[in-house]
Amino acid sequence: MKPLILRCLWCSRGEMPLMRAQVLELLDSAGDTLELSKRELSDDGCKVLAEGLQNKRTLKNLILSGCSRIGNKGFKALAEGLKINNSLTSIDLSYCTGIGDEGGEALTEVLKINTSLTSMDLSHCYNILTRCFKALGESLKFNRGLTIINLSGCRIGDEGYKALGEGLKTNTALKSINLSSCGVGHEGCIALSEGLKSNEALTSIELSDCEIGDEGCKALAEGLESNKALTTVDLSGNTFTEDGFDELANMLEVNTTLRRLNIDWPRGLSCASNRRKIVEKRLNENAVLRDRTVPMVLSNSAFLGGAEIPDELKELIVSYL
């Protein structure tokens, strides 16, 4: 069944907020996807939607992007609905600028309970601040379902990054986190680095356009040296200089899992060109090692006289690399 796509320019037409009957009708007629992007959905309408979600078992994707009229009351009601709903796998709340710390905290705390959500988009919800991200960091310690979260364009702050770093230390589910355009200072980079040192699940982190300087780059490189899960890191659009490039190049002497490292190389500098060649060479070596050599070794028992390689030895080989 094709997803129900519902778009219109309500704000420019001066339309009234969706009424209870309209919300229920839209929810009832939706297949696995309900998109209400930029609709005039108020707190009351969101409460009706939340009530309906408690019994809507076929809905997998809910898109409320740009529903700026929904405030904290509406999002708190939505959080209550998500505590009961066990079928929704993806929720898009990007550009929902009416959500503040109170509503954001309620939504992120749901992740302690909800086990069906695998993707959450809170990008450009710039009115959620430290309180929300502290709750998110705490939830990540317990959540075992969420694999993707987008926080790009949010104002996370040092305390928020400290909470996220703590959450990443023990989280075993999250695979991708987008922190682009969030602004990460030195303290924030240290907090994320500490989280990455212990994390064994995250494979992709986006930190583009975060105003990361040389000291922040150095802190992140220290975390990446110990990390054995990340395969993709995006550091493009940041402000670090040659010293930062050196830290990343040195990190790749130790790290054997990273395959893609996106950074903006200075043009016209021979030293930058040489560093780029070194970094690209090491990334390519990692790709060959992880994608070809390791699988070949783990599947080949010739050196054991034809005997099957014990699982303990396989784990030892992988952990050593």
Image (cartoon, helix red, strand yellow):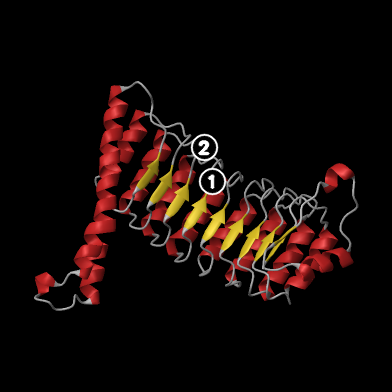
Instruction: Determine which of the numbered discs, if any, sits on residue 5 in the image.
Output: none
Image point 15% across, 72% down: which residue?
301
Q: Amino acid at mark 1?
A: Asp
The N terminus lies in quadrant: bottom right
Q: How many marks?
A: 2
Task: State the image coordinates of residue 111 (x, y, percent, origin top left).
Answer: 59, 67
Q: Quadrant of residue 242?
A: top left
Q: Which dot, 2 or 1, sits closer to the camera?
A: 2
**Amino acid type indicated by mark 2:** Asp
Residue 255 in sight from this viewpoint: no
Q: Secondary structure at mark 2?
A: loop
Residue 300 is situated, as x and y percent measured from the top left of the image, at 18, 69
- Residue 272's quadrant in the figure? top left
Q: Is residue 69 left or right of residue 170?
A: right
Query: Label 2 crowding class (10 Å Cα cut-off): few <14, some 14-19, many 20+?
Result: many
Q: Is residue 235 visible?
A: yes
- State how far apart marks 2 and 1 are (Cα): 17 Å
**Left or right placement of residue 71 versus residue 277 in this view:** right
The residue wearing badge 2 is 209
In the rendered structure, find residue 158 and report the number of the disc placed on it: 1
At 68% from the left and 55% from the top, the residue drawn is 93
Question: In the rendering, at what x and y percent does residue 43 appear?
Answer: 82, 59
Q: On screen, 38 above or below 242?
A: below
Q: Residue 281: x, y in percent? A: 25, 41
